[in-house]
Image (tube, helix red, strand yellow):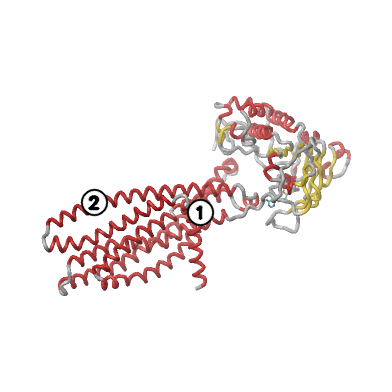
Amino acid sequence: MLKKYIRSSDTLSIISRVAKENAKGHISGYILAGVCLIIVATTTAFSAWIMQILVDDVFVNHNLKTAYIISGSVFAVYLIKGAATYIQDVQLNKIANNIVARYQTRLFDHLIRLGLSYFHKTRSAYLVGQINQNIAGVRNLLNMLITVVLRDLLSVIALLAVMIYRDPILSAMSLLIAPPIIVLVARFKRRVKRIARQGVDLNSRVASSMQEATQGIRIVKAFTMESQLSEKVRNLAAAAEERANKMARITARTSPLMETLGGVAVAGVVAYSSYNVIVLGGSPGDMMSFLTAMLLAYEPAKRLAKLNVNLERSLVDARMIYEVLDTPVHQRDKPDAQPLNIDAGEVVFDDVSFFYDGSSDETEPVIKELSFIAHAGKTTALVGPSGGGKSTIFSLLQRFYNPEIGTIKIDGQDIGDIKIASLRSKIAYVSQQPFLFEGTIADNLKYARPEATQDEVIHAAKLAQAHDFIVATPQGYDCPVGENGVTLSGGQRQRLSIARALLRNAPILLLDEATSALDNESEALVQSALETVMKDRTTIVIAHRLSTISNADTIYVINDGQVVDSGTHSDLIDRDSGIYAYYNSLQATGVPDLQKNGASTDPAPDTSTKQHENT
Ligand code: ADP
């Protein structure tokens, strides 16, 4: 009993939350639609009510004048009904479309504010697929309620009133079919809830498999994964189809139920009303009016019976939306957070320890009592085996996560006490795999500093050795680039990413050097672009190339979350032992980078736009 109560109160609380958050601003639209729905309900009842006059006055008493009046008024009433239906339809759709736009905006705003850990736990393609379905589902929640409650419930009430007015005993008898319908529909509702969630899950998995396969199409083809992925999608799609069919069967189950019980009621009424007119001398008009009201009440009553089931589907979507919207944004500024004041730009890690939330071994930190200094205006290289913690150091410095113990300071200011936006505005980040967003080349550069002028954009691109290839594209700076910049080579994308960092003009540069090999010309251009961007900035570079390491002012060898060695290139070479010497010897024997095992496992990126493509 208690469980049942909690369930229904949960339903009510979700409906009221959806209503509270969305009805505001649409009150006048809802009132207009409501009035129209009331008109529709009244006109329906009028058709039943008028039957009595038609039968008794026109058919029995042969009064032709009344027939003309009835005919005229029925026509007028249907005109009004048509207009009212149109207005409420347009109004409610307008509101529903606005609700979709609102949820889309709110969900996006919230998602991009969630911490990185949320995105590590949730597959992005799956999330997008799920959200799209949920929004489509919740779109109709309020409209369904309004239409069904105002139009259908009112129609049923008005028609019931006509029925009771014509014959109260017969009305009471026909209402006997209501209780079994209510009980059976409640049982369907529970099954709908479970299946709706499974359906959303399966459809999201189909959508995410498609998105991931297209994003990783190079790997798909390189590893001839086509048939395996096709098989996976086929199975998922079949499972989703099966769920959808199951849902259709359950939703439709209200129909045979209603038809059977409705048939019993109508048959009973036909038999009784005929007996009433023929044997008991009742008014044929009353009986005709009763029967019409009952038949007209049938469709809206069917929709009312289905409401519970359909509502449950939308509620599943609403619940899933709120699961996302209610995920707390973990990283907020402290109440007294200050902006970062950069003087020289010295970065200090002081005894920092950190472990990832939910990592397999939480007792073992990923970063262990790590201390190092990146001197102002100098280049500091982080080297060491893969998994040592270098990327985590970058994440901590950008405050994607907060360290458990220890402090990170920039020019003496603890970054934990600083406004996150201010901190990040002082840091330019060049990632290993440059990500280009949908839009033009200029758009992509300007994300670094939206207020930058066209001249500044061009200047940055020139310094980053990107200008020449940009102007060589058909539309120059206005050339659109795809999700992953597929029309640009790896070296070109890296130079765009360097131009973006230059445009940001931040005093601290974090550079995650690409492990993948570029052709010699690209390599030289990228190196020259990097030298420009590193000049006079505090640069911390996750270094994989010997040239970068040998040019660095200080090198820290990071292994297992700790600094295991440090010094200049020659210091480290002089010291015979240590991990750095080991990596240096690997490099000398021709292994191209300093990753663990000496080579990157990433396939080399495309270095040119392919003219002849083999699939
Ligand atoms: P590096 O950049 O030196 O290769 P990382 O900083 O990426 O090293 O990783 C350090 C350790 O932290 C590794 O053991 C890795 O598995 C773990 N790790 C990295 N990112 C996450 C994450 N988001 N959640 C849990 N563990 C992570």
Element carrying mark 1 = helix
Q: Nearer the viewer, residue 163 or 526?
A: 163
Q: Nearer the viewer, residue 134 or 101?
A: 101
- The tag earlier along the polypeptide, 1 or 2, is 1
Q: Quadrant of residue 580?
A: top right
Extreme residue in the bottom direction: 280
Q: Amino acid at mark 1?
A: Glu
Residue 314 makes an appearance in the image: yes
Q: Quadrant of residue 530?
A: top right
Q: Residues within 10 Å of mark 2 (few under 14, many from 20)?
A: few
Q: Where residue 427 sits in the image (x, y, percent)?
A: 71, 39
Q: Residues within 10 Å of mark 1 (few under 14, many from 20)?
A: few
Q: Which mark is residue 573?
A: none
| Above or below, 601 relative to 154 | above
Left or right: residue 427 compared with residue 378: left
Q: Where residue 571 sits in the image (x, y, percent)?
A: 87, 38
Q: Where residue 247 sits in the image (x, y, percent)?
A: 43, 59
Extreme residue in the left direction: 62
Q: In what quadrant of the picture does the C terminus appear?
A: top right
Q: Quadrant of residue 610?
A: top right
Q: Nearer the viewer, residue 196 or 535?
A: 535
How far apart are the two marked residues, 1 and 2, measured between alpha carbons? Answer: 39 Å
For image coordinates 40% across by 66% down, the residue present is: 185
Residue hosting label 1: 21
Marks 1 and 2: CB-CB under 8 Å? no
Element carrying mark 2 = helix
Q: Which mark is residue 76?
A: 2
Q: Amino acid at mark 2?
A: Ala
For image coordinates 41% across by 56% down, the residue present is: 144
Q: Nearer the viewer, residue 441 or 283?
A: 283
